Image (spheres, grey):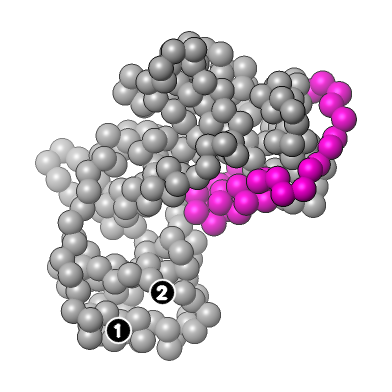
Amino acid sequence: MTFPAKPLTALAALVASASLLLGQAAFADVDDAVAKQIKAKLAAGNPQATFGDVRESSMPGLYEVDVNGGNVLFVSKDGGHFIAGDLFEVGPQKVVNVSEQRRGRHRAEVMDQQDKGEMIVFSPKGKAKAHIYVFTDVDCGYCRKLHDDVPELNRRGIEVRYLAFPRAGLNSVGYRKVATAWCADDPNKTLTDLKNRKNVPMEVCKNNPVAAQYKLGNEVIDVRGTPTIVMEDGTVVPGYLPPDTLVKALGI
C-alpha cells in the first residue's frame, strides 16, 4: 500500500481561494481508542509510512490522518478504508477546497517559523504592507523576470523574502551559484548580479542554509519549479505573477 503525493492545485484556484484560507477549522477530539485503531490498521498496511494526528473530518463518518509529514488521508472509523485526495465543501455559490485550506494554514505556520536572517530579503523603504516568500533559482527566466519586478513590489509595500531552490539539485552548478549569493558579503547585490548573468566568482561557504531551504521546498511546500511564491496565508503560487496581480492577491 502506497500513498500518493499531494496534488498541486491550479494557480487560478489558489489565488481565488486566498481569502478563504484565513479561517480556522474546529475539530472535535477523537477518542484515543479510535485513533489508535486507525493508526494501527494503516501502519499494518504500510509500515514505512509515518502517521501523525487523527482528527474528525468535516464529512461525517470520516477521519483525517496526517501521513508522511504533510499529506492527509480520509479514513473510516475502523481504519480499513481510506480516500487519498482533497475534500471539498459545497456552499452557496462556491466550492471550497477544505484540504487546501488546511495545507495553507500548515504552510503559513512553517514559513513563519523560518529564520528571516537566513533569507535574502528585499524590503520597502517604509513599513511593509505585506510580504511574500519566493523559492528561487538564479538561472530560470521567470525568476529573473520576477526579480526585475522587485523594486516595483517594494515601492508598493511588498517585502520579498527569497529562499534558495537550485532546480538541478544540491550537486549542481546551480547550487554553487545560488549558494554563492547566500555566502556573499552583500547577498542582495550578489543575487541580483547572478540573475543579471554577470560574471560572479563562485564561493560556497560552509554551513550555508541552501540545503535546508531546498529540503523545506521539497518536503513541506511541494515546490515543483521556480519561482514558487508562498503568500503570508500559505497560498502557493507555482510560477510568476505580475505586480498588479500580486497586489490584488495580497489584498493591499
Front-most of residues 111 and 14: 111
The range drawn in magenta is: 197-226
- For image coordinates 52% across by 21% down, the residue present is 123
Give the residue displayed 74% in from the left and 40% down from the top: 179
On residue 95, which mark appears?
Answer: none
State whether residue 208 appears in this view: yes
**Three-letter residue code for mark 2:** Phe
CA neighbours of label 1 inside 10 A, class few (<14), some (14 to 19), many (20+): some
Of the numbered discs 2 and 1, the one sitting upstream in the chain is 1
Task: Name above or below for residue 63 compared with residue 80.
Answer: above
Tag of residue 36? 1
In percent of width and height, residue 175 lies at 76, 43
Q: Main secondary structure of the magenta part?
A: loop
Give the labeled residue for mark 2: 51
Q: Residues within 10 Å of mark 2 (few under 14, many from 20)?
A: many
Image coordinates for residue 143, horizontal then vertical, percent = 63, 29
Q: Is residue 74 left or right of residue 30?
A: right
Where is 62 relative to 249, above or below? below
Kind of residue at disc 1: Lys
The C terminus - image quarter = top left
